[in-house]
Amino acid sequence: MMHSSTFLVGAALVTSLVPLWPTAQAQDGAIALEVVATAVRTQGFPCEKPSSAQRDAQLSKPNLPVWFLTCESVRYRVEIMSSGRRARVTKIE
């Protein structure tokens, strides 16, 4: 089981990637994928073989990036909350 400090570091990393996204998409895309997948798993949601994490610029707000995470058999909408709060995870049917 992951500690809350691991999640806090992950959430901070995802938030810091938001301004860099257009210029470093390939390298940071792999990092974002793992961070968002870890945030989802930390909260007890299954995510086997994550394949993509895409930030939705239209739904995202300052200090509240919204990501769509695709795993092997499920897809999630993930809102990375600031201030150390847990991510808001919604399974997409």
Image: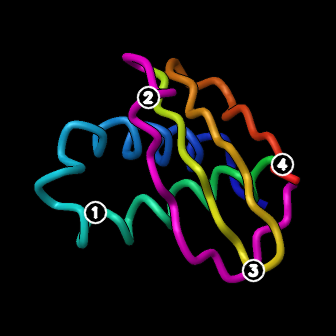
- Contact check, label 4 and label 1, Cβ < 8 Å: no
Disc 4: which residue: 91
Spatial separation of the CA atoms under disc 1 and disc 3: 21 Å
Tell me the colour scheme of the image.
rainbow
Q: Nearer the viewer, residue 90 or 15?
A: 90
For label 1, count other residues whose C-alpha is less than 10 Å away and answer few (under 14), some (14-19) or many (20+): some
- What is the x, y in percent for residue 5? 57, 42
Secondary structure category for the residue under label 1: helix
Spatial separation of the CA atoms under disc 4 and disc 2: 19 Å
Q: Which residues are magenta?
A: 44-63
Residue extending farthest to the left is 23
Q: Amino acid at mark 4?
A: Lys
Disc 3: which residue: 72
- What is the x, y in percent for residue 59? 51, 27
Compare marks 2 and 1 and give the one earlier in the sequence.
Answer: 1
**Label ID, residue 58:** 2
Q: Is residue 87 left or right of residue 45?
A: left
Compare marks 1 and 3 and give the one earlier in the sequence.
Answer: 1
Q: Amino acid at mark 2?
A: Gln
34 drawn magenta:
no
Residue mark closest to the camera, 4 vs 1:
4
- Contact check, label 4 and label 2, Cβ < 8 Å: no
Spatial separation of the CA atoms under disc 4 and disc 3: 13 Å
